[in-house]
Image: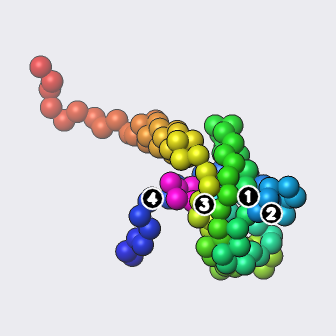
Amino acid sequence: MHERRSYERFEVDGKVTLKDESGQSIISEASLNDFSFKGFGFYCQDAFKKDVVISFDIFVQPFSETLSGKGRIRHTANPIGFASKVFNSGVEFIDVNSDHVTHILKRIQAKIINELRNNRQSEPLNFLPY
């Protein structure tokens, strides 16, 4: 399948606190699903309307990093195979510290590289090294 996005999304665990646009009142709590340079995806029991502007606090595990900002809901769907009260939504960043986003992405990528290194099977040598 052809990837439509300009930036790769990384699966990541975490929590998201969704607030109204002013950031004053909490609308909902959600589970972070994925993260990219341009936005993030989350699972929530509430359905959000497209193009609604929200404020958010994202807590990215296991780094104990919190990212706050504003974003726009780009889609909401009820994924197949999930309970009928779970929705998958995507948010596009509007106002966020891009240096902090880059920092979090670098930590996610470093974690993936370390996991790949740790899971790599060492292959037996089929020649005599000199």
Helix, strand or loop status at disc 3: strand
Helix, strand or loop status at disc 2: loop
Label annotation for residue 8: 4
Q: Tell me whether circle 3 and circle 2 mark residues in contact (CB < 8 Å).
A: no
Of labels 3 and 2, earlier in sequence is 2
Which amino acid is tagged 4? Glu
Q: Can the viewer see residue 116? A: yes
Residue drawn where x is 80% and y is 70% of the image: 45
| Residue 27: image location, x then y, percent | 84, 63
Q: Return the residue nearer the eye: 87 or 115.
A: 87
Of labels 1 and 3, earlier in sequence is 1
Q: Which residues are magenta?
A: 35-40
Which quadrant holds residue 21?
bottom right
Residue drawn where x is 44% and y is 40% of the image: 113
Label annotation for residue 10: none
Residue drawn where x is 12% and y is 19% of the image: 130
Q: Tell me whether circle 1 and circle 3 mark residues in contact (CB < 8 Å).
A: no
The residue lying furthest to the front in this view is: 22
Label annotation for residue 55: 1
**Residue that label 3 marks:** 94
Number of marks in the rendered image: 4
**Residue that label 2 marks:** 20
Which amino acid is tagged 3? Ile
